[in-house]
């Protein structure tokens, strides 16, 4: 009897040694949405007031309103690796606590690592059940030690896609669809292990891979600028932020700076996220730090290295002292993200602003 | 020629492989350096795609440290997000995928997901596909960088992350639903490989000066096809090394690393 339970449309079976490993663990359960269903997501949207209303609130208020106390949420992390990661929001989520999370993102670095570290050190505060993703690491800085720790100890479940696959899943949800056909995953082992499926095209009979939409309960986005209603401008790479914000049931936006609605209306083409897709607007300078925000600051490699080396020491030796100190000093020892930023030397913030090189952005 | 490091040899060879007036979709590190070197020398018309969103930026702020680096967006002609660049790639706008990985097999399939243990409880979990799986599927040709070691050039991958020619069946890629034509070159510091048109198996095309085909075969688990026109790999000139060291990666993030 084949250990592969999933129906495959390509010739992938037996190309790798995956079959001999433990594929039987990946059961083909009846499909379930890991976040909202398209119908529930639509209902949430339809029931929202659609007027232009002031959505500004504090970081604390936004997380208390949309995340704290709701177990089992699917939280989508915006940005891409070290570009515009919503770090301020992740700190606040750890402070307030969130259990039984599903995380969804294409490629992410310090955000899931911070949540993973919180889960390992403060399991009563934060727990991750599963992650739908394409990539989790620090690129030039190294692999993600806490991901490796969680997986080698069987503590979380992963659902693997490509960067386009995850982006297409958010895009499908932003279009109100159940799935999108894509030209990747087929013929790779992701076809065997992820929740997509190969079908025959109804038009030509050719094999076509479908990825299920991803409708997160909450999307976390850090935008370059926004008005008080939630219209967002993003400069530099958009990553998958527009799609995530429209896909999610609720979206919290932190932004470097609030700009007048009049500016938004002067250049409506520059609006990458419409206000209807946004539920909370938090003005938070350096809200993506230690990641980068194009036109504002470059990423702070030293700070990321510091957190990563504390994480790596925990993975390799089990000694959590440094890692714990990081959380106590920078997250639990702070009331706000400004408190955290106040602990950094001015020269650090000055340096990362200079390293950005003054990338051009339009705020007018 | 001055002495060059293994990474400089890989970057230089990568540059040589890239044709002018094409577009290369790059992964982090050596692919970026190889592409910058190509633009500075024989391929001024080469454009670069980074997966976070930019199409054909001008890398005048120095080498982006990652494919999501804000510097990779500098003076791009078109700058959106992941969907835009991967959809252009599905449509045929990207000629080369330039990726790396942990293991490769004789059909150019690549593993960058895990090693050891099982998929659900991997001893060594890697970051995952990232863009590589989509690039290998839909860029027209794939170029893969790999360290030449027996444990990396394997008979069977532990996980197939980025599609090559699969099991070598002529219709493997068609049945997978992908659009690109597949693996084109595999670059190591000691040898350059291509693929046989009919059998889809890896072919040894070039060896580093002083190496023999037998020495390369010893570092590969599967049987290589040796090209009848086996050549010696070209080495970087002093000017090439100057460009690599002072223009492409002046801080030595990737070129000055120690080989494990």
Image (tube, rainbow, N blue to C red):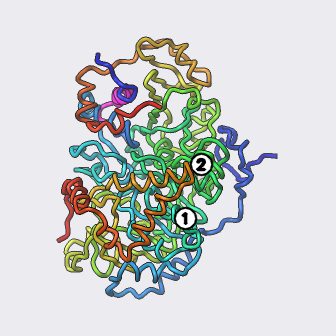
Dot 1 or dot 2: first in sequence order is 1
Where does the image place residue B27, in percent across and percent down from the top left? 40, 42
Residue B226 in which image quadrant: top right
Give the tally of numbered discs.
Answer: 2
User: Tag 2, which secondary structure?
Assistant: loop
From the viewer's perspective, tell me whether residue A118 is left or right of residue A157. left
**Of residues B31 and B256, which is closer to you in this image?**
B256
**Of residues A338 and B167, which is closer to you in this image?**
A338
Do the residues indicated by labels 1 and 2 lie within the same chain of the protein? yes
Q: Is residue B10 magenta?
A: yes
User: The disc numbered 1 marks a residue on which chain?
Assistant: A
User: The disc numbered 2 marks a residue on which chain?
Assistant: A
Is A167 above or below relative to A139?
below
Instruction: Tell me where the magenta segment starts and ends, as one range.
Output: B9-21
Q: What secondary structure predominates along the stretch shown in magenta?
A: helix
Marks 1/2: CA–CA distance: 49 Å
Residue B211 in view: yes
**Of residues B7 and A232, which is closer to you in this image?**
B7
How dense is the environment of label 1, judged by Cα within 10 Å: few (below 14), some, or many (20 and up)?
Answer: some
Residue that numbered label 2 is attached to: A206
Quarter of the image for the C terminus of chain A: give it.
bottom left
**Of residues A58 and A328, which is closer to you in this image?**
A328
How dense is the environment of label 2, judged by Cα within 10 Å: few (below 14), some, or many (20 and up)?
Answer: some
Q: Are marks 1 and 2 in contact (CB under 8 Å)?
A: no
The residue located at (39%, 66%) in the rendering is: A86
Number of the label disc, if any, that sits on residue A121:
1
User: Tag 1, which secondary structure?
Assistant: helix
Q: Is residue A212 magenta?
A: no
Where does the image place residue B137, in percent across and percent down from the top left? 50, 43
Where does the image place residue B164, in percent across and percent down from the top left? 54, 36
The residue located at (49%, 41%) in the rendering is: B136
């Amino acid at each position: 009897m084949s250990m592969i339970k999933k129906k495959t449309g390509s010739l992938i079976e037996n190309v790798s040694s995956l079959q001999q490993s433990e594929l039987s663990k990946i059961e083909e359960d009846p499909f379930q949405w890991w976040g909202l269903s398209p119908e529930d997501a639509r209902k949430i949207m339809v029931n929202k007031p659609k007027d232009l209303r002031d959505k500004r609130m504090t970081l604390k208020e936004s997380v208390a309103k949309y995340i704290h106390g709701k177990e089992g949420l699917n939280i989508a992390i915006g940005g891409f690796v070290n570009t515009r990661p919503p770090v301020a929001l992740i700190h606040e989520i750890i402070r307030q606590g969130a259990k039984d999370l599903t995380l969804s993102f294409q490629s992410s670095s310090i955000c899931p690592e911070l949540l993973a570290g919180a889960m390992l050190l403060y399991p009563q505060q934060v727990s991750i059940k599963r992650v739908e993703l394409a990539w989790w690491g620090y690129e030039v800085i190294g692999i993600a030690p806490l991901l490796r720790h969680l997986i080698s100890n069987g503590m979380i479940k992963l659902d693997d896609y490509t960067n386009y696959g995850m982006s297409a899943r958010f895009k499908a949800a932003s279009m109100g669809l159940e799935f999108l056909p894509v030209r990747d995953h087929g013929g790779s082992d992701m076809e065997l292990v992820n929740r997509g499926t190969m079908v025959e095209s109804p038009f030509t009979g050719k094999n076509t891979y479908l990825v299920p939409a991803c409708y997160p309960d909450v999307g976390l986005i850090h935008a370059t600028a926004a008005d008080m209603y939630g219209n967002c401008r993003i400069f530099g790479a958009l990553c998958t932020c527009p799609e995530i914000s429209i896909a999610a049931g609720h979206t919290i936006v932190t932004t470097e700076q609030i700009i007048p609605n009049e500016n938004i209306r002067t250049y409506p083409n520059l609006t990458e996220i419409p206000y209807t897709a946004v539920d909370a607007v938090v003005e938070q300078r350096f809200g993506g730090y230690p990641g980068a925000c194009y036109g504002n600051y470059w990423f702070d490699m030293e700070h990321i290295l510091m957190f990563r080396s504390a994480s790596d020491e925990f993975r390799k030796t089990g000694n959590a002292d440094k890692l714990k100190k990081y959380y106590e000093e920078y997250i639990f020892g702070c009331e706000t993200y400004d408190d955290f930023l106040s602990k950094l030397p001015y020269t650090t913030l000055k340096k990362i602003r200079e390293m950005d090189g003054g990338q051009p952005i339009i705020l007018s | 020629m001055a002495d060059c490091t293994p990474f400089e040899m890989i970057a230089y060879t990568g540059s040589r492989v890239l044709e002018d007036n094409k577009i290369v979709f790059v992964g982090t590190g050596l692919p970026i350096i190889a592409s910058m070197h190509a633009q500075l020398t024989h391929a001024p018309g080469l454009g670069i795609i980074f997966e976070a969103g930019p199409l054909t930026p001008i890398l005048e702020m120095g080498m982006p440290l990652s494919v999501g680096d804000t510097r990779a967006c500098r003076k791009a002609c078109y700058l959106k997000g992941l969907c835009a660049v991967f959809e252009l790639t599905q449509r045929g706008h990207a000629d080369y995928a330039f990726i790396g990985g942990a293991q490769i097999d004789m059909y150019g399939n690549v593993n960058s997901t895990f090693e050891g243990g099982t998929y659900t409880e991997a001893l060594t979990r890697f970051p995952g596909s990232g863009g590589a799986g989509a690039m290998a599927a839909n860029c027209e040709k794939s170029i893969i960088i790999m360290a030449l070691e027996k444990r990396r050039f394997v008979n069977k991958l532990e996980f197939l992350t980025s599609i090559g020619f699969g099991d070598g069946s002529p219709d493997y890629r068609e049945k997978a639903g992908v659009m690109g034509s597949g693996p084109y070159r595999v670059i190591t510091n000691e040898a350059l490989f291509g693929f046989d048109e009919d059998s889809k198996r890896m072919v040894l095309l070039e060896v580093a000066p002083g190496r023999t085909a037998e020495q390369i075969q010893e570092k590969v688990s599967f049987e290589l096809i040796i090209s009848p026109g086996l050549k010696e790999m070209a080495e970087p000139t002093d000017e090439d090394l100057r460009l690599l060291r002072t223009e492409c990666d002046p801080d030595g993030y990737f070129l000055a690393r120690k080989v494990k």
